[in-house]
Amino acid sequence: MDLDQLWKNTQEELHVILAPSIYQTFIIKTQLIAISNNVATIACSNAYLADINQKRYYSFFKSALDNQTKNSNSLEFIVQEPIKAESVATPAGPLFTYNPPSIQNSNSIRSNLHPKYTFENLIVGNSNNFAYAAAQGIVKNPGLSYNPFFIWGGVGVGKTHLMQAIGHELLKNNSSLKIKYFPAETFGNELIAALKSKSINQFKERYRHLDCILVDDIQFIAGKDYTQEEFFHTFNALHMAGKQVILTSDRKPSDIKDLEDRLVSRFMGGLTVDIQPPDYEMRSAIITQKANEKGIVIASDATQFLADNLQSNTRDIEGKVQQLAAIALSQNIHTITIETVESFLSPDSPSASTFSQKVTPRHIISVCAKHFNLKTSELCGNSRRKDLVTARHLTAYLLLNEINLPLKEVGHLLGGRDHTSIMHARDKVAADLSTNPQLRTLINQIKSTF
């Protein structure tokens, strides 16, 4: 088996066992470039990926590769120029790369689809996994699987991206499809213009002979009687003909005030899904992806700090990474460090209002690891080495006393330890503080760097 096929098989195994967001961010941009004497050299597209894969996902890579080679291998992660798209493994799912023909680009433009809103640019995590799975069903059977498909959620969580990704994929599969994306407000404005110009028949023809409509922010037709009337008939014409209807809103159909009952009933007659704000893992993946797109490297602890503090939505995360990229360019910074991020998010920064200003658990762990010259993975690992145990006890003490985390959560953060172990660590440090002034000085030193 050649190296490319071996690595393709390895990646396919990793794709099965890892979360989609982790696979897309950390696994797909790797390539096996050599294997000799059971030592595998794996190229990563940047230093951050090489570091994370070495620290967090080494065992997963090793297990998958060992299964393929039937040998026990050691791994070496190196930094190499970004791998060309055609050499990347393309397992099933949203993570493939394709070069659409020119006709598709032309159709995408006519369909009002944004070129960036594709499945390959979509981060999939716990908050949108169900919606993504349903979207895949629509791509396979448009007009049949889930029709209408109603996506709702807050601002900036990725509703429009997912909806347009379906449109792109449908065109990829069949470039002759007539697909149109439009905001609901555009439908109303064009209807008014058609009435004024006495061209209502042309208006109806334009919308009712499409194969798929992608309607954004459908809540904006609420309270507009004639617009609702016309959309009701347009919806019925398409639905009866087996054409796909996809809608988005900031709330579920039954919660849209002044929306006619007959429209609410039809909107809920298919599949209604919600997309929540991204969780920590998904935020980390988004930050890494956007940093790669901007050509910057954000250190792992800085990524963790951002993901901990920026908890609003995907759009806000993208905006902050864009600002960090501008800072890196203006100051000729190669790697964004946690110090740069903390300065960027300082109370004096105009961007700070969207961030939590309190110290986060992962920041405390990162600071403690740095103070004791340890890796975070070592601090949260299983080793009982004396210096590690001491650092771990102090970290547990600070997590409990500085930000009042529950015992169970501290145990989870520090390697899955039970609450009695954390209680023991806290009580031991508290007892030592009464007799050891050097320990109090040490704790104050660590706290001063929070």
Image (cartoon, rainbow, N blue to C red):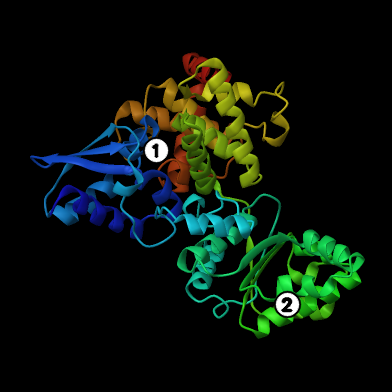
Q: Do the residues labelled 1 and 2 touch (CB within 8 Å)?
A: no
Q: Residues within 10 Å of mark 1 (few under 14, many from 20)?
A: many
On screen, residue 271 versus residue 171, left or right, reads: right
For the residue labelled by badge 2, is the local secondary structure a helix, a strand or a loop? Answer: helix
Q: Residue 210: which quarter of the image?
A: bottom right
Viewer-nearest residue: 342 or 443: 342
Along the polypeptide, which appears first: circle 1 or circle 2?
2
SS for tag 1? loop
Q: Is residue 412 left or right of 144 when viewed as pictured?
A: left
User: What residue is disc 2 on?
Assistant: 235
The image quarter in which residue 73 lies: top left
Residue 259 makes an appearance in the image: no
Q: Does 232 sit above or below residue 370?
A: below
The correct choice, above or below, for 444 with respect to 256 in the image is: above
Circle 2 packing at 10 Å, graded few (<14), some (14-19), many (20+), is many
* Percent position of residue 54, x then y: 30, 37
Residue 271 visible here: yes
Please tell me the numbered disc located at residue 380. Answer: 1
Q: Which residue is drawn at 54% across and 33% down?
A: 305
